Amino acid sequence: MKFTLKDYQSDALGDILTNLRKARRYWHLEGDRTAFSLTATTGAGKTVIAAAVFEALFYGEDAFEFEPDPGAVVIWFSDDPTLNEQTRFRLLEAADRLDYHDLVVVQNSFNREKFQPGKVYFLNTHKLGKKSLLVRGHDAEQEAEQTGQSLIEMRPDLRSYTIWDTIQNTIEDPDLTLYLVLDEAHRGMGGTAKDKSSIVLRLINGSGSVEPIPVVFGISATVERFNQAMKGAAERTTLTNVLVDPAKVQESGLLKDTIVLDIPAEAGAFDTVLVRRATDKIRESTALWAEYAEEQEEVDPVTPLMVIQVPNTPDPAQIGHSLDIIREQWPELGPNTVAHVFGEHRDLKFGQWVVPYISPERVQETPRVRVLIAKDAISTGWDCPRAEVMVSFRPAVDRTHITQLLGRMVRTPLARRVPGNDKLNSVECLLPFFDAKAVSAVADTLMNGDGGEPPVPGRRVLINPVEMTPNDAVTGEVWEKFLSLPSQSLPRKSARPVKRLTALAQELAADALLPDAGKLAHGELHKILDAARARYSDEIAAAVRAVHTVEGQSLLADLIGREKSFQDFVEEADAAVIEDAYRRAARSFSPDLARTYADYLAAQNTEAASLDDALLDAHADVAAMGLVPEVKEYLDEETDRLAKVWLDKYRVSVKRLSDERQDIYRQIKEMSTEPQDVDLTLPGLRMESTTVREANGDEYPLPKRKHHLLADSEGDFPVDLNQWEMEVLDRELARPGLSAWYRNPSRASQDSLAIAYREGNGWKAMRPDFVFFYEMHDGSIGAAIVDPHGYHFADSLPKLRGLAEYAEKHQEVYHRVEALAKVDDRLRVLDLTVPSVRKAIAEAEDAKSLYGSSHASDY
């Protein structure tokens, strides 16, 4: 893969490969057909996951010990040829082992007896329609039955095989496995499993002489309809569906954190006012991206796009008037910068302006287009991460159309979060025809899903927010203390220390921080394996003998006495057996390390008759080491230790690199099975609501407090807290020596203090509510975590344990780490800097008993 998979993408890949392994076995050994789905929110990178799946299917995947399927054939099916072409491009962009020849668009001239293994064939609904050249002449008996008359089979252009023939022949070939991948699987599934009217369902359930496709894999953000159809599918086993946690998608930085909704504060026609405001926003965004690109020394800054959304029957004069305003407000906007994506597919005139058509999938890659005119959701699968401002002329009743289009605009343009800047991590939507009640409904849909997609934890939807910037009253010493606070990353359950070290070496060499880091890394890994050979020499020697021998039994049948007996035999293993054992070990260590270490051992072997013999002996030694579990454990421990040494050694140098490069090192640091300490980023610009709107449209201002790290022009910060959280805040603000405080963001961002904790078999991140900064008796700045959290929540005790472990690990950083809860109208506090309190938390069965015990005190 050209891309490093996010943690949740890697988890999904592992689950999918587990299903495909079962599906292949069920089909070839038992003849059972299977189906399962992948559900992931818009923007999760479903195509990137699919690219990794196809590479594993065709070439294997060492990380999950997945053997390639030499007979794998994939049909990628959607209802839109344009979407197929976009998917094909994305697969090529993501995969480094797939090329154009492996991704075949099935044209009308396609004519093969069977599909070729190792290829993905792109089909769409139109290619399987009754009038398509690919299907004409198929199943003449069925057509005669439907029409009531006998028909002569006519195949156009002397076609030997229709596409249905090709599908059937591929299914019947015992050496091939046909996989059907349904893109946007919720589409075309309107009928029941027994309904053959849908082309999609004909592929799934078979039709006429064509059998059902053996393995069906549905991909979508909303697959309920697909899953329902699978439940009734005849003779098809449903495997465990793969569900991507939307919270992890939001945490990844692939999606924008904030959606800002601007609406008029009073009734009236304000479309011209908000068009002017939208233009100012896109100009500001353009300037911010240019400034960021200059700061990061990037050659090509992001060129943000403004989308004008109009009703399905738009008024050309109104659109023209809007373009007049935009041109007037943005005089430097050049020619050929406005386009539309209407269904007319031709130039259209709006007022005095002639606007050309552009296909939706080309918008992202055409930076000269700065203003795009659209109707509703444009088309399924269209994404434009650089679209950052939208003004919608849809009325309030069309909020579904608005949320659909916003859903196509939520990807981050750099596929990562810009540290400390809410503005560059947001999308803004201006709604001139919406009132407070209607816009609240839009906000709820964007945060909680529309009944199809799952909710998106961590996403913020703000209505008419205000910008907060660094508070001039906060001293440099406070900011230094803030940057010293260690945040934590979540462990990766599929982390491999060798891969982590070699990835780190590659990046250190690329940034000229450690020349020849790759060679140095492998040299150190060879030393570790040498030490393992010496440490576990007896176990490895026994394993070498096992590699070089093949044990079996012979059955002896005495035909006269009618008796049977077994006799053991031992034979020397040939090269093929040794190489097979070596490949298994290589998957465990890493193929690259196994190769270089085998070469290293072969070069030291002076007794071998030839280089080939020396290499075979080396492969046997590596294979034997792979049979000793302690060797792998030792390798992982020592490799992890070395990676930590290098990360610490070059930490300061890395912080001088660009945000993009720092983000790569952050991801490498997170490639661990244990939480890792990571640096916080200074918050630079945050957008916060200053008012609260109830569902009925009522509005009231939020209270404000001084001394926050970020503030408005008056030095104030708005706070949206419950009654006892506000009580905690005010008590802390009244303490002597207070210098500043920080409302820790609850969403995943680099300026949010995160603390890892275990829950069940996995890891999650808690984000304490408050961090306070005080001037200590010696003049230094001290930090305190104060976290009000209800004891009745299911995660209360796991969070307490995570916070206690964090407090113990970082005793020198904080002078107070306190957890609070309200018990019987009294605020009770647990001081996690006290060892006995931490011990009680570790042994407790519930959080409530802790707050009621002698380990807690009144706040």
Image (cartoon, rainbow, N blue to C red):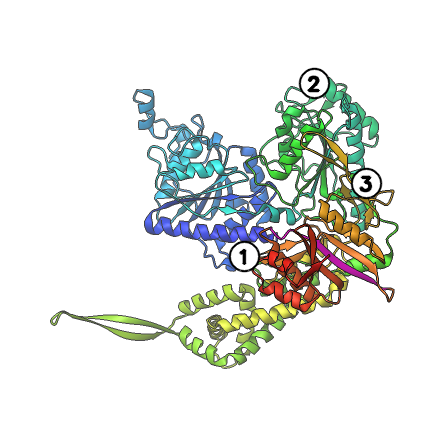
633 with respect to 458 (left or right): left
How many residues crowd mark 1 within 10 Å: few (<14), some (14–19), many (20+)? few
Question: Residue 367 lies in what quarter of the image?
Answer: top right
Residue drawn at x 28%, y 74% is: 568
Q: What amino acid is found at the position of numbered circle 1 in the picture?
A: Gly
Give the labeled residue for mark 2: 315
Give the labeled residue for mark 1: 760
Residue 272 visible from this viewpoint: yes
- Which circle's residue, 2 or 1, is located before the other in the chain? 2
Q: CA–CA distance between discs 2 and 1?
A: 57 Å
Residue 603 visible from this viewpoint: no
* Location of residue 326 in the rendering, given as x and y in whole percent from the top left corner: 79, 27
Mark 3 secondary-structure assignment: helix
- Which circle's residue, 3 or 1, is located before the other in the chain? 3
Asked whether 783 falls inside the magenta stretch, the response is yes
Give the labeled residue for mark 3: 287
What secondary structure predominates along the stretch shown in magenta? strand
Closer to the camera: disc 2 or disc 1?
A: 1
Q: Residue furthest left?
A: 560
Residue drawn at x 87%, y 64% is: 779
Q: What amino acid is found at the position of numbered circle 3 in the picture?
A: Ala
